[in-house]
Amino acid sequence: MSSGKGLTKNQRAVFAVLQGAQTPMGAYQILDQVRDQGLRAPL
């Protein structure tokens, strides 16, 4: 899989979560994992 070069900070955070996932993840599961990095759901 790609190393994530050229991605935004938010994209890199999501990419890292997905790389470490053992099973498929939903959007809100991903959001829960990256929330401590300042990401929020769009309004």
Image (tube, rainbow, N blue to C red):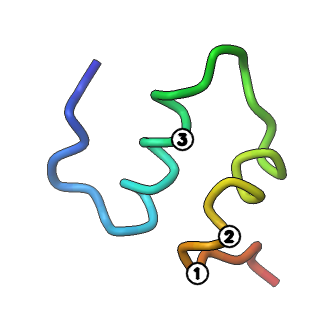
In-front residue for pair 6/20:
20
Q: Secondary structure at mark 3?
A: helix
Extreme front residue here?
36
Q: Secondary structure at mark 2?
A: helix
Label 2 sits on residue: 35
The reply to whether the C-beta atoms of the residues labelled 1 and 2 are less than 8 Å apart is yes
Label 1 sits on residue: 38
* Residue at the image position 54 percent from the left and 33 percent from the top: 18
Amino acid type, mark 1: Gly
The reply to whether the C-beta atoms of the residues labelled 2 and 3 are less than 8 Å apart is no
Q: Position of residue 13 (x, y in %)?
A: 45, 56
Distance of label 2 from label 3 (alpha carbons): 11 Å
Q: Earlier in the sequence, mark 3 or mark 1?
A: 3
Label 3 sits on residue: 17
Residue 36 vs 12, above or below: the answer is: below
Amino acid type, mark 2: Arg
Q: Earlier in the sequence, mark 2 or mark 3?
A: 3
Q: Judge the density around disc 2: few (<14), some (14-19), many (≥20) Cα neighbours within 10 Å.
A: few
Residue 3 vs 12, above or below: the answer is: above
Q: Secondary structure at mark 1?
A: loop
Distance of label 1 from label 2 (alpha carbons): 5 Å
Distance of label 3 from label 1 (alpha carbons): 14 Å
* Residue at the image position 72 percent from the left and 20 percent from the top: 24
In-front residue for pair 43/29:
29
Residue 20 vs 28, above or below: the answer is: above
